[in-house]
Amino acid sequence: MKALTEKIFHYLVLVVITLICVAVMWKLSAKQQVAMKRDGADVRPLALVAAPKAPVAIQPLQVQTCEIANTYAGKIQPWENYQVGFAVGGRVIALGENKAGTPLDEGDRVRASQVLAILDDRVFRAQKSEAAARVEQATSELRRAEQVRKTRPSALTESELERLVTDLALASAQFEIALKNLDDATLKSPVDATIARRMVKSGESVSPNQIVFELVENNDVLLVVNVPESHIRELDERMRIVEQQPPKQDPSRKAAQDSSEEDAIFRAHVHLEGHDRFGNPWPMLAGEVYRIPEVSHARTGLFPLEIRLANRERLLRPGMVATADVVTARLRGYQVPESAVLFRQRSAHLFTVTKEPVQMEMLYWQLGESYVYRAARVSLSRWIDQGEHVFVPAEAVALRSVVVRGHFRLADKQLLRVVNSEDFLPDEVQVNIPTGRVDIASGP
């Protein structure tokens, strides 16, 4: 019994001590809160100019005419292929000569009407002489018959006179054939072209219409790209817009004229695959959409779109691989770097910089008006993804700048410190690079 009483007494003592400790702690906490409230009434909040700011880099934006393009891949093909040969058979006695005076071979450049090859024409010359003699004979006989008929009409019947006229016509036709055969003994180029293949040598015999040379017309070449059927309607609409453009405007309005001339061209920017010896990509080529096919390819189901490329220096060869950015529209808007746009599921937004006036203070003195910069979150209702850039229509939003670095953790209305060069800032913003501080000054 005595042991139980001592145990209960010990528990009661512990409970009393615990309650006393809780009461002391509550009292001390209450006094501390009262002191904090009393001291806080005399503490001034930190000025916005001196408040911590998130470092960002911005890029200025302005409304410009942006090109909306789709990218396709394809191969370069010659403008036209020609397979030429002699219309008559015979033995080749000579080939045409190139600029160096040597016989024509593959890769040589030829002009229109330039001699490619010559056949042994001795037989054709003899046939021409024979046909000419027959024409002379038939002409003489007809002339004598007409004189006889004038003096003695009954001496020559009408049928005999018609026979002589027919003989002259046949002799003239044979003479024309002989002239053509003699002319066909010399093979000439139909156009300015490059020899792709030569299938005959001097001294060889050829048959009529046998292919002797393959020529490619390559002053202009065609880049043929494969377009899916879902893009054909967009390309047709662009072609109609181009065809409806006026031919030329007033020369005094040069800027408007240049813009109109560009609108009147179905432009395609072509990039050749590969790099030069220094690892740089080849220069971009300016092309123009030449033809939109009516039907798709039977095997691939794609539409082979043809893009015309100038090739005066003949640096482009059939078989080269290239990609083309086909301009489907030219619209007024902003070209924003793709990295500056934050995509969230089906929505997108970016951050721009706004300017807010504040009072600059030191201790208890007012030093005048200054400015701070805040982040402004701009939601994009419409945009077009163009790979490295995102096109934003001018009527959808008004922008002067966009945050390109430091924007992934920004919040709306957060204070900012711009860290990039003043060349990239709006007119009213200047940056002091050595100190990293933002010096605020009004624009002109």
Image (spheres, helix red, strand yellow):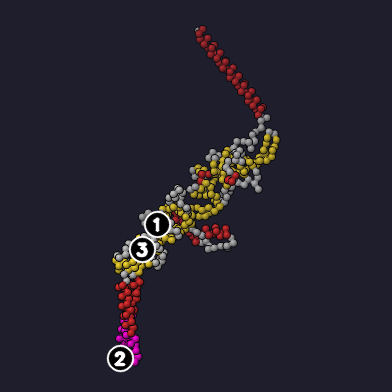
Q: Are marks 1 and 3 in contact (CB under 8 Å)?
A: no
Q: Is residue 208 visible?
A: no
Q: Residue at x 69, y 38 (%)?
A: 367
Which badge, 1 or 3, is on the more N-terminal residue?
3
Please name the predominant secondary structure of the magenta segment in the image. helix
Give the magenta range. 141-170
Q: Which residue is mark 3?
A: 103
Kindly identify which residue carries mark 2: 155
Magenta-colored stretch includes residue 158: yes
The correct choice, above or below, for 235 with respect to 408 in the image is below
Return the x and y of residue 186 as percentages of the image width and height.
35, 69
Q: Around disc 2, counting alpha carbons within 10 Å, would you say few (fewer than 14), some (14 to 19), or many (20 or more)?
A: few
Q: Earlier in the sequence, mark 3 or mark 2?
A: 3
Q: Amino acid at mark 1?
A: Pro
Residue occupying the point 60% across, 44% down: 422
Classify mark 1: residues with Cα within 10 Å, few (<14), some (14-19) or many (20+). Answer: some
